[in-house]
Amino acid sequence: MQAIDLLTQRQSNPQLQLPAPSPEHLALILQAGMRVPDHGGLQPWHFTVVQAKGLHKLSKIFVEAVTLNGADETKLNKTRKMAFRAPMIIVISTKCVEHGKVPKQEQVVAAGCAAHAMQMAAFALGYGGMWRTGDLSYNPYVKSALNVAEQDEIIGFLYIGSNGNAASTKSPKSFEAHVSYINDLS
């Protein structure tokens, strides 16, 4: 697959199954996350790889978080299954630093770029993936349980695995309404 095809045809697939990326492929995925634009070379991110028995631990963290918020049985059952949507989850969080020239917003964007680059690398290696956020990304209990500092953020949960059922192909999205041009100085 050509890089431009990957970028213009990529789509998430929620049907992910074993096998997960091999250790060699995981290393490539993580390397892609490290190569993103990073003003000041701060590397303001952290990746937590969750797989195998770790998925059970993550499920427990999720359930405890929603229990603290008074979830009903339906919500608990749904939450219990969330960590098992894929055989591997990479939690991308910020690790922002005080810097006179690089504001926190730029560091958050860099961490988001890392998540995107890792998702593209997974696709380039033949895996499917889905970048999810949701209430648990912003939950203080989840952040604490995953050792994300209070001042930092969970950018998302990158679910990765082999494609199960093929997702239906989406039509290209029109960019015209989202673009303006400045063509001269007059």
Image (spheres, grey):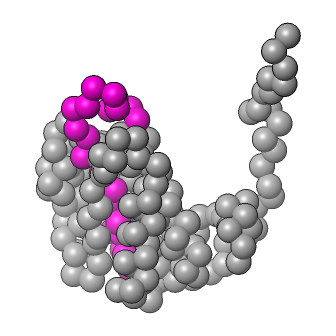
Residue at the location (29% across, 70% down)? Answer: 49
- Within the magenta stretch, is there residue 104? yes
The C terminus lies in which quarter of the figure?
A: top right
Residue 160 in percent (x, y) is at: 45, 73
152 or 101, nearer to the observer: 101
> Which span of residues is magenta-colored?
81-106
Image side of residue 49 versus residue 146, left or right = right
Image side of residue 134 versus residue 56, left or right = right
Residue 104 in percent (x, y) is at: 32, 32
Q: Is residue 76 visible?
A: no
Question: Among all residues in the image, which is located at the extreme top?
Answer: 186
Residue at the location (47% across, 79% down)? Answer: 161
- Within the magenta stretch, is there residue 159? no
Residue 62 in percent (x, y) is at: 24, 58
Q: Is residue 30 visible?
A: yes
Image side of residue 133 versus residue 4, left or right = left
Find residue 92 and report its image quarter: bottom left
Residue at the location (19% across, 65% down)? Answer: 60
Q: Is residue 67 above or below residue 104?
A: below
50 or 185, nearer to the observer: 185
55 or 150, nearer to the observer: 150
Find residue 102 and report its image quarter: top left
Find residue 127 and report its image quarter: bottom right
The N terminus lies in which quarter of the figure?
A: bottom right
Residue at the location (76% across, 32% down)? Answer: 179
Residue 8 in percent (x, y) is at: 73, 60
Q: Is residue 20 above or below residue 131?
A: below
Image side of residue 92 versus residue 60, left or right = right
